[in-house]
Amino acid sequence: MLRILLLFVFFYTTSIACGGGFWPDDYQFRFLHKRNFEFANITGDLTSSRVYNDLIYEYNDEIKKQNIKEWKAQFGNSYSEKEIEDIIYKNKELSKIKNEEIRDYIDFLEYQKPYISSWKSYYSRFGYKGKKIDLSKVPSMVNEALLEVDKVKNNYLKLRYFFIALRLSHYNNLDNTLQIYEKYKYLLKNSNSIVKDWIQGLYAGILIKKGEVVKGVYEFTKLFGEDKYNWHLAYYNFKYIKTDEQWNKLLSMAKNKEEKIKFYTIRALNVKANVLEELKNITKIDKNSKFFDLLLFRTLLNSQDFFDISMPFYYDSKVVKNYEPFISYLKSIKRDNMYMVDLTLAYFNFYQKNIDASKKYLNKAYKEVSGDDIHELNALKYIIYLNNLTKIDEKTENEIGTKLEKLMLQPCNKNSLHKYTFYKIKDIYKKQNNELKYFLSKNIDYTNVNAINLEKYNELKALENKTNKTILEKYMIKKIFSSSYFERYLKLAYTNILMNNLMFEEALKRVKKTTKKEDKLEFNIFNNYIVGNNRVHSEKKYTLYETIKKLIDIQNNLKKNPNSTMDNYLYATALYNLSYWGNSNILTTVYRSNYYFKEKDNELKKINLSIKHFKKALKTAKNKEFKSKIVYMLAKSELALYYINNAKVVNYNSTKVHETKRAYSWNISSTYENYIIKGYGKFFDDLKNKYQDTNYYKELLKECGYLNYYHDTVEDIKRVNTQIKNSLNKIELLKSIENDTKLKRKNDLNKYNQIYFYNLFRNIKLSKSNVTYYNNIAYYLNKKRKNNEAIYILEKIVNKYPNRVVALYNLGDAYYDIYNMDMARKYYKKYVALMKKLKKENNIPKKVLSRVQSW
């Protein structure tokens, strides 16, 4: 029916086998066609808010369309659908209505609206459209509607007045709802109006409200069919059957085999149902029932979570399901049409790694296929092929490309087949150390220009210009460059790439010489300010051409005079400002994130060069104020160096990037602790010790509050160090800390921060005699969610004792708990390898194996 097709165009279904082919999101693959069964194409829990809300939204939208069509026919096609929507749903343009009976009905329809609303109690107290409603009027309104049923000549209006009366009575808990239904149900005979389904739903709900639960549920099941509009109500009201007694009574009410099968089917739709048992129940009644196909298809569709990619952050690997019970049962089934059975057996055997059996049932299904169904068989055949690949050479690339191009011509499953191909082959390319093909496979649909560095750019252009491309290479290039946006911005990005690699002469060749005001750069890369994080608009503005030209001139000057104070200072300042932390990183990257930087090596190169040239400038500078400015820039460069070296590698938009963690914040627990502990801070110390009498330093203290935080942290370290030194027995101190971390709450452990343990290791050196104490302290800290402190201690342990199994295990847990999956995996893998070496693999916790395998 067209109505069912329209209902599910947006919501997971279609009435033709091929569907739209757009099942999945980025972490799912679905290779089946959509079926024209109730709930067939919806996976998971049907009572979830996501499913229910979307379904109701689409149902209401479709009902509105059908209702407008019915009214259009009543008006003799005199009005457009837009005009009818204004009349019926917006209560506008009523003067157009010439038929008095219809006009009276529409007026009454508008009048009764607030009385059937879930807000009616609110409207009775505070008003509806500026006027309070009187709920005591409902009985008289019901009578008025029933009088119209008897009075109007138009049978269409009679049915609608009947519905209004029944709904008013039901929604307001009147006693006469069943009497109204019994008296006027004759109007339902020979009616094809959507109102008939509405009334059936009301009647079923009335029975349940009156205590006739089983009968009400039975009446709701009458809506479960392709020719019904509100068939979802059959499932959502089946929840009232809660006992075996109610279930047996419902079965006894079935008038035929079809109704009994329908009951088993609706019960099987529950997410907790034993679908296999319900399939057996249906088979006993009618092995060829269409509802058998519905349940089997839903089971097969749900099983395709086998292909889902684990989400990249918090989740362990998905649970591996056992499909053997289904396989055993389905092998015994003999039906007139075995296609769905054989398709399911082909997939379930594939999941169980019974590849020969999977191919056997796939070939059987091919013999039973008709029409578009062949496309989902082609999909499975291709999936089996991809999963058998262990290496990829030119011949294989031509095979994959040929198969993929054919699959892209079929109308179904294209999106999933395309994405699954590159999901499977990317890891093979990675194992073969083919970084370009790995990169292209991983980013085939979302190639971010910002993810392309100089090496990737050159490799990509070389592949684009390659004369004898394989069929898969042609497919890749076509897909990558299919977006004119990507190709245009890649050309623009090349200048940024050159700048990021400090290839200024090459960049200059690509930049047009211009003096237009609108082409002037916002910031001057040769300037350094204290305020505004150095992002102060320059009074003297340069174009990009002028900026690059000046950089090249400075480089040439330094070749002639390497010790030039000002050239070293200007060059170092420019390099810093072209880094991620400078004021002009827009010149070296396409898109600057506030949290991530792209290329670690290039950032290190810029910062290390800036430090080198700042030091040269400092060595030859004479003026103390200028020296303090240089030392401040050295401190900022050193801070950037800390960010780079301590950044966490993460995936962002399918690209590996580096996530920064600030050394300072307004949270006292994180003020420069790790920065100082890691050995940084020399230039901040020099500023205070050597230049505190300069005006520049005094201005720094006013503008840069984090300097005070740094010096406060230094004082904390000295204070804690003195406390530990003055402690009595060192072993007793470790025992005391172990006891505290074991027994006290997290809030009572504030003094045990990284500063404390930094000083503890300085005073009590790690040794074989105390390593157990340190390990236990770290373990208890991790349990109290003081993960940074735990990690600090455990890394000290594994650096000195790399074969200490328990420390590797605990370190993996600590990193996992702060969602640093790369580091967690690193230490889990070391732990697993060591346990296997010690022949203790049976003692490895399942969670560790799961976490290692899931990434």
Image (cartoon, rainbow, N blue to C red):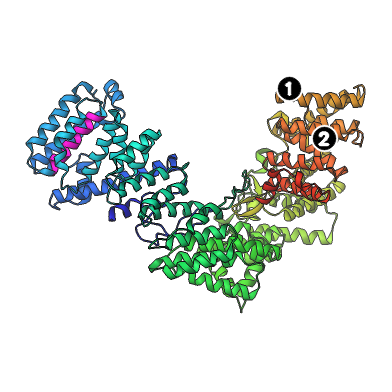
Q: Name the residue under label 2.
A: 775
Asked if 198 appears above or below 31 in the picture, the reply is above
Asked if 60 appears above or below 714 in the picture, the reply is below
In what quadrant of the picture does the N terminus appear?
Answer: bottom left
Residue 355: percent from left, percent from top = 58, 64
Q: Can residue 692 be seen in this view?
A: no
Whether the residues at callouts 2 and 1 have beta carbons within 8 Å, the answer is no
Q: Name the amino acid, label 1.
A: Asp
Residue 142: percent from left, percent from top = 17, 29
Q: Nearer the viewer, residue 261 or 457?
A: 261
Q: Give the range drawn in magenta.
A: 156-170
Residue 83: percent from left, percent from top = 20, 48
* Cα–Cα gap, marks 2 and 1: 20 Å
Q: Which of 245 and 26 is in front in this view?
A: 245
Q: Is residue 162 left or right of residue 39?
A: left
Q: Is residue 735 left or right of residue 516?
A: right
